Image: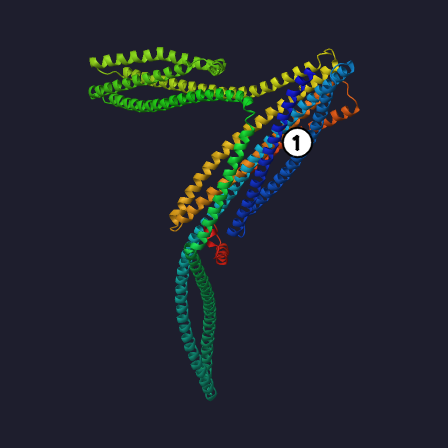
Amino acid sequence: MHSIKTFWSPELKKERALRKEESAKYSLINDQLKLLNQENQKQAMLVRQLEEELRLRMRQPAPELQQQLEALFSENEHLQREIAILRDTIKELELRIETQKQTLQARDESIKKLLEMLQNKGMGKEEERQMFQQMQAMAQKQLDEFRLEIQRRDQEILAMAAKMKALEEQHQDYQRHIAVLKESLCAKEEHYSMLQTDTKNYYHAQVEELKARLDEKSRLVEKKTAAALSATHELAELRDHSEIKDRKINVLQRKLDLREATKKLQAAGAQNAKAGEDTAQAKKQLQEEFKKLDDARRQFEEQRRTVENKRKDVEEKEKALAELDRQLKKRKEQMDQMEASLRKAGGSTAAVSDLNRKLSDSQKDADQLKQQLDQTKEEAQRLTAETERLLQLVQMSQEEQAQKEKQIIDLQQSVRNLQAKLKSQQQAQAQREEDLTRARQSELAAMRDLETTLSQKDALATKLEESKMKIIDLEIELNESSLILSEVLKMPDGPEMNNIKRSKSFFELQKSGKVVDRLDKCKYSRSDNDLDKMHYKDKKREPPDLSKLTRKIFDLTKEIGIKNSKLIEQQRCISILEEALRENNNIAEFEQLLAVVRSKDERINELEKFVNKKCGSSPSDCKDKKRILELEEALKESVLIAAEREKVFYEEEQRRIETLRKMGKMEQRIRSLQNASALNCGTCSSVLKRLKRLEDALQHCQANRDHILRQLSHLVQDVLEGAISEKDTQIAELEVKGVLDESETNRYDTLKAERDRLLNRLKTENERILKLEQYSEPSPPSPGTLPVDITVTDELLQACDDNEEDIPATVL
């Protein structure tokens, strides 16, 4: 009896304490789910408010913005469905907990009754002892079942905590997406303002061009009028000439009549013959006059046709000028209307106050969302306090990684310093080459002119001394750089330095250092001796020789080549050191992967120990070994999945860095455009301030939204991984049993099928995360093209006239 009491009382207390802890955890999880649901509702309300503001500010929104909003709404609905599924699972868990509590209470009551009966009867008989032993065995079985149930509940609690974390990340992802939408809206508004300024400039240029064309047309009209006047003068002259010709014809006809009359009167033949000759001559003269008259009439008709054509051209030009005048008046009226609308937009304080009020409300909502997020983060920290012991090893590895990164940064800084010194040395080398070219020119001049060689030789000697001093300075700097390289290589031995020393780049670095030393010893000594000899010969002031001067020039060029080779060696050393640093970075990433693989190996070893304990009675069973091998393969697959996930995370981090860099460039471009628009517009400072506030609020909301989306995606991943690990443990338990009945085999098959389905789901979730990251990258707004047609400006001006009440928002 005493043994039964000692066996049952502490275990029952532990079970009750565990049940209380489970109920407290589930209540905390329910509270957190309620808070997250409230946050999601508020986020949906905020998205709707932002959508209404967008509709108010842009009556005709861009199709890209509509697609983004539709995608955001679809994601929100998907998240709400997932939250409903999580609620159903929590309710099922609560029902199961209540049923188990009821069964435990019934068992406790039955055990208490049995204990009371045993206390009343005593322990005298063997049957009672057997009954006690049976009860003890049953209690042991129940304890094992309860322990397994507690472990399963702990796993479910961890999965729920992971879901909570994913929901928080999803909330942040939503906020980031909202910020992206606000940025796109601001960019479109800026594009609209730029279009307005461009249309103004284009319109002014068009007006000036039309004025110039009008002046040209007026000049052409004046020319045409002058030509028409001259043509009318010519026509009048031709008419006068034709009248004179008609008069002459009439006179001639009268003469003919008189001659015919005289012809009748004259009877004599001689007179008749003479009159016939006169009449023949008169007829000939008349025919010639008629021909001249016909020619004059034809010329007159041609001139009249040309004058009529010119008049038609003048009338067409006058019509075109009238049309241009009408268009100019219309453009002037539209410009006046646009200026009035802009003045009205600049002075409308009511719209500005309304926008400020909306901004303050959105900022208040953002602050409330921040507070709620802080509360959820604190609760998540409370939930994850139990898992901190397991994360200490990870923190230690991270600290070691930070130390390694610090050492790498120091090495990179030293490499940068060396590069700076090399640049300064190259500049000095270039200066020295210029000096040497000058010296060479002076020597050539000395060879051409032998009379002035002595004076030029002194100047050349001084220049050679200066170049020698500069060469000595350069040698000192090169020695200092080599000392710095040696100090870098003499750093304390560690895992990173050992890896660097094992690599090929370290051996190449040593070879390059030896080459530089040989160059220093042999070639610099030769150049110094040559320079000393030259200096000694200059002091003796011997007459110059052409061969000596050419030898000096050859030595100086050789020295320049030596210096250049040494600089190239130094640059190669630096490149080798940079390659070593890159190898070190790759080693650090490989160490991280090794740490993950070690953790998975530890898990495999623990599972093998558990299997060995369960299967200690039959170590020679081949079926159990095969099942253990299958279990190990499953765990290896999970390790590979974890490695793939880490690779995906690394790619996402690189993509995030690239997007941040692009965003920085785009922000600089936006700032420059804003500064340019502020300089062009005198009343845009307040508008830009308002824009900045709106942009900050939008970025905040978008950051929260992106965080929530990311949390949800990671939560789904964690839930799937937890479910996969749970299925693995259940499969392992069934495999450890050995011989299975029909129901257990069916369960084994269903567990395997579910595990495969969960693995496929995990892969699809990873792909979905990649697509989500690609979708959340902000795309820079395409720069708008300037309008080049009058119809485009007409449409813009008509839109401005239709939307005079909404001009403040569109200008923003």
Left or right of residue 97, residue 46 in this image: left
Q: Amino acid at mark 1?
A: Arg
Q: As rendered, which of 318 and 99 lies closer to the eye? A: 99
Q: In the image, what residue occupies the spot 55% across and 42% down? A: 43
Q: As rendered, which of 65 and 82 lies closer to the eye? A: 82
Q: In the image, what residue occupies the spot 53% across and 42% down? A: 178
- Residue that protrudes farthest toward the right in the picture: 742
In the rendered image, residue 649, in percent from the top left (x then y), is placed at 56, 28
Q: In the image, what residue occupies the spot 52% across and 49% down? A: 54
Q: Quadrant of residue 735?
A: top right
Left or right of residue 118, residue 418 in this image: left
Structural crowding at the residue carrying mark 1, measured as other residues with C-alpha within 10 Å and reported as few (<14), some (14–19) or many (≥20): some
Q: Is residue 715 above or below residue 570?
A: below
Element type where label 1 sits in the image: helix
On the question of residue 770 being in view, the answer is no
Q: As rendered, which of 226 and 590 lies closer to the eye? A: 590
On the question of residue 12 being in view, the answer is yes
Mark 1 sits on what residue?
761
- Residue that protrudes farthest toward the front in the picture: 120
Q: Which of the image's four quarters has the N terminus? A: top right
In the rendered image, residue 166, in percent from the top left (x then y), is placed at 58, 33
